[in-house]
Amino acid sequence: MAKVILFGITEMSEMMHFYLTHDSPHQVVAFTVDERYLDCESFCGLPVLPFETIEKTHPPTDYEMGVLLGFREVNRLRARKYAEAKAKGYRFISYISSKAIAWPGVEVGENTFVFEQSVLMPFSKVGNDVFVSLGCLVGHHSTVADHTFLSAHVVLLGCVNIGGYCILGANATIKDLVTVADSCVIGVGTSITKNTKPGQVYVAHPAQLLPKPSSQLSNWVTWTANMPKNRKAPVKPKPGGEQG
């Protein structure tokens, strides 16, 4: 069990406090932020302390840290604070949800968080300072480099390589054998089938707005609209009651 200080006082920090409290052997003892953002004394019932002097009250010999700052500045803000905490001498926790699947031999770096229903397949590797959100698939022999953020339900098929400082939006899919270069942003629901170029943004076509309101499309949203075309219509009875 480690006594843990969490960097940040955001919704993500609150969630991580919940996960570590209910699903890990670790004990969160405090939060920390840069002093200029220190606008409260407590968060989740624990003290909030200035990062500039945190090592004086909570020395790295006795405490570990988790840096939780999302993907601002394409993960660079989180990477800077991770580096600053490391320079102070802190070690970092990692968290893999008990409701995730990580097969034996999978490599997971420090300050990396893998959330519920995610699957890390055999021979996959996830680097340092990485977020693997709810329901992701990291396929066999795939690699996720440092300082990257996978949003919910991202799918990496086999032998995929994700570069550092990338953001993959929810439901993005990367085809097998594809490399996503460093600092790429892959939009929500985007399918990548070829290698990307560094620092580029790839997005799927947005939803199309039809000219008619839903009230005028009732035939499109009823089960009869999807009936097989070869379904025979009911036979109308002939005059006199005969149906022959």
Image (spheres, helix red, strand yellow):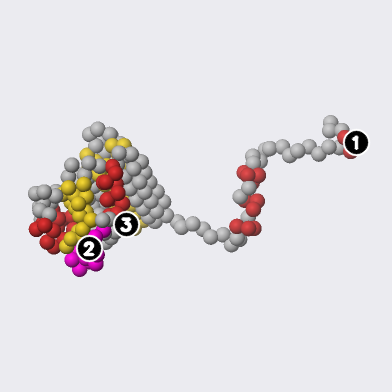
Q: Which residues are magenta?
A: 33-43
Determine which of the numbered discs, if any, sits on residue 95 in the image.
none
Q: Three-letter amino acid code at disc 3?
A: Glu
Instruction: Name the residue carrying label 3.
Output: 11
Instruction: Name the residue carrying label 1.
Output: 240
Proximity of marks 1 and 2: CB atoms separated by less than 8 Å:
no
Q: Tag 2 or tag 3, which sits nearer the N-term?
A: 3
Q: Nearer the viewer, mark 1 or mark 3?
A: 3
Residue 95 image point, x, y percent: 25, 44
SS class of the residue under badge 3? helix
SS class of the residue under badge 2? loop
Instruction: Name the residue carrying label 2.
Output: 41
**The furthest residue to the bottom:** 36
Q: Three-letter amino acid code at disc 1?
A: Gly
Q: Nearer the viewer, residue 12 or 211?
A: 12
Residue 149 image point, x, y percent: 29, 51
Looking at the image, residue 218 sits to the left or right of residue 95; the answer is right
In the rendered view, would you say 211 is above or below 188?
below
CA neighbours of label 3 inside 10 A, class few (<14), some (14 to 19), many (20+): few
